[in-house]
Image (cartoon, grey):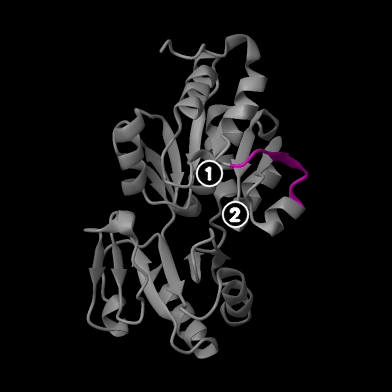
Amino acid sequence: MIASDLDGTLLRNDGTLSPRTLRALRTAEDAGAEIVIVTARPPRFVDRLAEATGLLGTAVCSNGALVYDIATRTVVSSRVLPLTTAQRVATAIAAVIPGIGFALETGNQVLYEPAYRLRMSEDVGAELPVPSLADLWLTEVPVTKLLAWSDRLDADTLLAAVRQGAGDEVQLTHSGGRGLLEISAPGVTKAGTLAALCAGRGIEAGEVIAFGDMPNDLTVLAWAGTGYAMANAHPAVLAAVPVHTATNEEDGVADVIERLFASRVRPEPAT
């Protein structure tokens, strides 16, 4: 199995999948490897990528909260964050970091209160405001992540500060978003969900090659038989993961796959 993060890893900085990387993934599939996307992104983002590239298969979305079948656009399994837990943790975080804003990721939409002023261009039409923070906790839709955003603190500083207030009640991480913290149900990680997926397929950790660039990828890179940090990875990832590949702009994932399946690499198309 080849398990790859998306942003900063499989995708280039403009959010596209290069022709070279797409060919490499097809080569690996032809050789019998399963490709699994392991991302902080929600299913709606994976759907758009699949439409643009033809990628199918399975995606572990929302940092492990969802397992998603791309072909049928079906959530196979989920581990949601209880709304009462999200509210309690948000209250604790707000006490530590005044002025912080909150949003709820559902997989299909982002519900946000007035203090959460972060907007994602790729989420136009999926971001829905609620009148107040209190209204955020009235949703009846299952929640995959609580998002906490600060316009004053970077993600690393925010994570360190929130750890003091949130304790062990939830899973805290970030994927590099400016001042953005991602909060999941306790025990929900990319690695935990991928490990369960592999167990169901009879695949051992030693048979998994993983790629990532951000702190939320560390669990997967440590669990997989071989974990590659991208050359453009977060300093903590580069320090923790001994094996590196080229940057996402240099098609670092494709570079590894091409070497692994050298005898099967597809030739460049004629021009």
The magenta stretch is 240-247
Residue 86: x percent and y percent? 43, 73
Please say if 231 is above or below 26.
below
The quadrant in which the N terminus is found is top right
Q: Is residue 246 left or right of residue 123?
A: right
Residue type of the residue flagged with mark 2: Met
Please tell me in which quadrant of the rendered image residue 211 appears.
Answer: top right
Please tell me whether mark 1 sits on a helix, a strand or a loop. Answer: loop
Residue 197: x percent and y percent? 52, 37
Instruction: Confirm whether residue 258 shows in the render.
Output: yes
Q: Based on the picture, tell me whether residue 242 belongs to the magenta stretch.
A: yes
Residue 143: x percent and y percent? 36, 62
Q: Is residue 224 left or right of residue 136?
A: right
User: Residue under circle 1?
Assistant: 5
* Residue, far front: 271
Closest to the observer: 139 or 35?
A: 35
Q: Residue at x 56, y 34 (%)?
A: 251
Q: Residues within 10 Å of mark 2 (few under 14, many from 20)?
A: many
Please tell me in which quadrant of the rendered image residue 74 appears.
Answer: top left
Please tell me whether mark 2 sits on a helix, a strand or a loop. Answer: loop
Please say if 163 is above or below 63.
below
Badge count:
2
Closest to the observer: 102 or 231?
A: 231
Instruction: Confirm whether residue 203 shows in the render.
Output: no
User: Residue under circle 2?
Assistant: 214
Residue type of the residue flagged with mark 1: Asp
- Circle 1/circle 2 CB separation < 8 Å: yes
Q: Residue at x 56, y 66 (%)?
A: 172
The quadrant in which the C terminus is found is top left
Q: Is residue 142 left or right of residue 188?
A: left
Please say if 75 is above or below 129.
above
